Amino acid sequence: MPLIQTIEPSEATGELAKLYTLIEKMRGNVGNNAKLFSASPELLRQQMDFIKFYMNHPTLSMPLLAAIRIMVSSSEECQFCIDYNTGMLINMAGWTFEQVAAMRRNIDDANLPAREIAMLKLVIKAIRLAHSVNADDLDSLREMGWSDSDILEAVNHATRMLATDIIFNTLKIENN
């Protein structure tokens, strides 16, 4: 049970009820990840806007973004997020469980094109050792065709995932 009180869809009113309705239309149900944010409808709206921005990103693929989330969440031991994003890769990108496990053991084994593995490695380096990222790291990505906005948006995605993991771990989210 989470450490803060959450609101079920049947009990939601006002802005929260509207947000829950949107979530149900998008996903078919309101998961525990959304319910955990129910104590602050404004934060839930911000989280939804963040997700919408990345849902149809023109250059950061869904598998790359899910891989970023899994690798960040693996470091933070956020099992909810690991399971959720593993399901996305398996059900939406056609990965196998073994491919996800291989990536978690060795990032170079990610079932992604080489340029996406390079972006994934930079993002994880930024999360774990931000001060060690240097101009050569970014130049390597640029040589692969990544833009500065791609790099910023990928790092932003990872840092927001880190924040979400901290919230979920602190408040004890339950798997759906």
Image: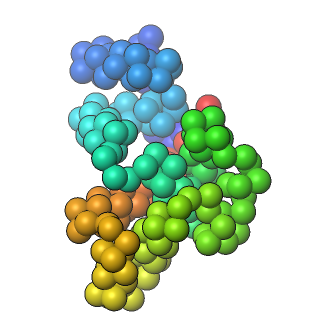
From the top left corner, tell me how far across and down residue 52 is, in percent. 31, 37
Identify the image quadrant of residue 160: bottom left
Most foreground residue, 89 or 125 = 89
Image point (76%, 53%), residue name: 98
Q: In the rendered image, which quarter contains the C terminus?
A: top right
From the top left corner, tell me how far across and down residue 79 is, in percent. 63, 51
In the rendered image, the residue lying farthest to the right is 98
Viewer can see residue 45:
yes
Q: Along the horizontal axis of the image, is 30 left or right of 22?
A: right
Q: Along the horizontal axis of the image, is 60 left or right of 89?
A: left
Image point (27%, 38%), residue name: 49
Most foreground residue, 128 or 13 = 128
Image point (70%, 69%), residue name: 105
In the rendered image, the residue lying farthest to the top is 10
From the top left corner, tell me how far across and down residue 53 is, in percent. 28, 42
Q: In the rendered image, which quarter contains the N terminus?
A: top right
Q: Is residue 24 above or below residue 127?
A: above
Q: Along the horizontal axis of the image, is 14 left or right of 141?
A: left
Q: Is residue 36 above or below residue 109?
A: above
Viewer can see residue 66:
no
